[in-house]
Image (spheres, grey):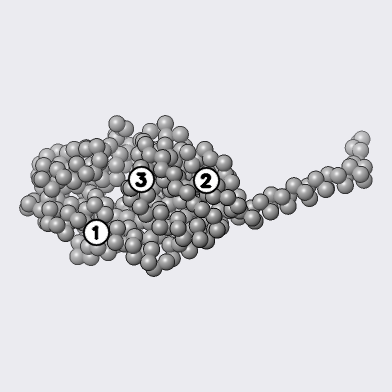
C-alpha cells in the first residue's frame, strides 16, 4: 500500500498556527458579545400587549447585557411577517424577537406560506408570559355556568353563537376545542379583531366569547359581561371563584404564551447569556406584579423547555385546525 506523503514540519506549523488563530477569534467574539445594540422584533404593531409587555422586560435585559435593546415593530399576517424576519436574520445574537402561541404554533398549521418552520428555524431562548382565556357571556344572559352553556348547545345544535377575532385566532380555536371536547356544535361569528367582537357580546348579539384577561376583566368588573370559566390548568389569579373548564371536562387546558426566539444556529454561549438575562428580568417582583395587573403571569424557562412547549402546542392546534377543517381567510 502506498503511503501518503506527510506534511512537512513547516506546513504543519502553518496549519496549526492558522487553526490557533481562527478558534480563539470565534471564542473571543462570543465571549465579548454583545458589543453593539441588539434588535428585538415585536411582530405586532406598537401599543398592543406584546409591545407593552416586552418593553419593561427589555429594560432589565439591557442592564444585564450592557447594550441597548431596540424594539422594532413589524406587524402583519397575525405576527407571521415579523417572526419570519427573526428566522431570516443572522444567528449572531444581534437580532432576536418575540413569538407567541398564534405566530409560532397556529399560523404554520393554517398556512404553508408563513415562511418559517417553528420547529426548525429558531433557537428558543425563554418563555416570557403565560395567559389563560376567559369564557364570557353577556351580563343579560341566563347562562351562569359552563354546563348550562353546553346543555343549550346540545339541545339546539349550531344555534349557540360565539364571537372571535377572526379565523385562526385564539378565541376561535379555544371555542372549537371546547366544542370538540364537549361534543357539541356552536355557530362561529368571526370579526376583524377582538374589539368589535367584544362589543357585540356585551350587546347580546352573540352568546359567548373567549377573551384574554387584559380586555375581558374591565367588562366583567363593569358589569357588561359575566365570566363563567377559564382555560388554564388552575383557576385564574384575577378570578379565583370562577372554575376552569378542566373542572368540568378533565384534561381541557389551553394556556397561551409569549416567548423569546433567535434564528437557528445561534451559538450556545450567546443563547445561554440571553436566557440568563431574561430569567433575571422575569425574577423581579415588581415586573411580575405589573404583568399580573395586565392579566399575564411571568414565566421564564430553559431553552429546551420552550422548544418542548412549541412542539406540543404546534401539535395540539394542528389537530384542532385539521379536525374543524379551518382554512385561512
Give the mark nearest the N terminus, 1 or 3.
3
Q: Which residue is mark 3?
A: 46
CB contact under 8 Å: marks 1 and 2: no
**Is 166 left, or right, of 89 in this rendering?**
left
Residue 228, above or below 200: below
Quadrant holding the N terminus: top right
The residue that mark 1 highlights is 244
Q: Residue furthest bottom?
A: 285
Query: Which residue is depicted at the point 14% across and 43% down?
Result: 200
N-term mark: 3 or 2: 3
| Residue 247 in the image, given as x and y percentages of width and height | 23, 60
Circle 2 SS class: strand
- Residue at image x 69%, y 54%? 28
Residue 174 higher or lower than 240, as above or below = above
Across the whole image, how many numbered discs are drawn on residues? 3
Circle nearer the N terminus (1, 2): 2
User: Is 33 placed left or right of 111 in the picture?
Assistant: right
> Which mark, residue 301?
none
Secondary element under disc 1, as helix, strand or loop, is loop
Quadrant for residue 156, please give it. Answer: top left
Alpha carbon distance from label 3 to label 2: 18 Å
> From the image, which quarter does the C terminus lie in?
top left
Q: As rendered, which of 314 and 155 lies closer to the eye?
A: 314
Evaluate whether residue 36 shows in this view. yes
- Label annotation for residue 95: 2
Q: Tell me whether circle 1 and circle 3 mark residues in contact (CB < 8 Å).
A: no
The location of residue 85, given as percent across then percent down, is 47, 38
**Residue located 14% across and 53% down the image:** 225
* In this rendering, position of residue 258 left or right of residue 20: left
Classify mark 3: residues with Cα within 10 Å, few (<14), some (14-19) or many (20+).
some
Amino acid at each position: 500500500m502506498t503511503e501518503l506523503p506527510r506534511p512537512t514540519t513547516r506546513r504543519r506549523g502553518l496549519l496549526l498556527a492558522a487553526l490557533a488563530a481562527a478558534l480563539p477569534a470565534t471564542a473571543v467574539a462570543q465571549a465579548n458579545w454583545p458589543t453593539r445594540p441588539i434588535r428585538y422584533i415585536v411582530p405586532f404593531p406598537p401599543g398592543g400587549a406584546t409591545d407593552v409587555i416586552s418593553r419593561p422586560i427589555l429594560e432589565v435585559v439591557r442592564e444585564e447585557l450592557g447594550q441597548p435593546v431596540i424594539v422594532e415593530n413589524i406587524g402583519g399576517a397575525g405576527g407571521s411577517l415579523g417572526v419570519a424576519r427573526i428566522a431570516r436574520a443572522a444567528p449572531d445574537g444581534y437580532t432576536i424577537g418575540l413569538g407567541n402561541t398564534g405566530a409560532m404554533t397556529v399560523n404554520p398549521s393554517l398556512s404553508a406560506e408563513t415562511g418559517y418552520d417553528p420547529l426548525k428555524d429558531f433557537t428558543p431562548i425563554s418563555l416570557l408570559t403565560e395567559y389563560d382565556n376567559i369564557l364570557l357571556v353577556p351580563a343579560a344572559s341566563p347562562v351562569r355556568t359552563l354546563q348550562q352553556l353546553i346543555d343549550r348547545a346540545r339541545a339546539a345544535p349550531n344555534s349557540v353563537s360565539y364571537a372571535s377575532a377572526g379565523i385562526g385566532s385564539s378565541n376561535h380555536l379555544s371555542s372549537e376545542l371546547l366544542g370538540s371536547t364537549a361534543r357539541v356544535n356552536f355557530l362561529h361569528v368571526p370579526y376583524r379583531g377582538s374589539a368589535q367582537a367584544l362589543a357585540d357580546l356585551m350587546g347580546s348579539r352573540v352568546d359567548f366569547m373567549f377573551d384574554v384577561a387584559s380586555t375581558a376583566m374591565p367588562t366583567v368588573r363593569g358589569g357588561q359581561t359575566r365570566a363563567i370559566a377559564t382555560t388554564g390548568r388552575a383557576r385564574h389569579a384575577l378570578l379565583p371563584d370562577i372554575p376552569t373548564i378542566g373542572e368540568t371536562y378533565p384534561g381541557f387546558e389551553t394556556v397561551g404564551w409569549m416567548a423569546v426566539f433567535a434564528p437557528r444556529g445561534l451559538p450556545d454561549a450567546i443563547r445561554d447569556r440571553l436566557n440568563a438575562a431574561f430569567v433575571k428580568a422575569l425574577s423581579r417582583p415588581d415586573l411580575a406584579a405589573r404583568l399580573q395587573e395586565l392579566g399575564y403571569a411571568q414565566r421564564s424557562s430553559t431553552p429546551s423547555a420552550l422548544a418542548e412547549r412549541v412542539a406540543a402546542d404546534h401539535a395540539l392546534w394542528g389537530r384542532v385546525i385539521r379536525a374543524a377543517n379551518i382554512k385561512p381567510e
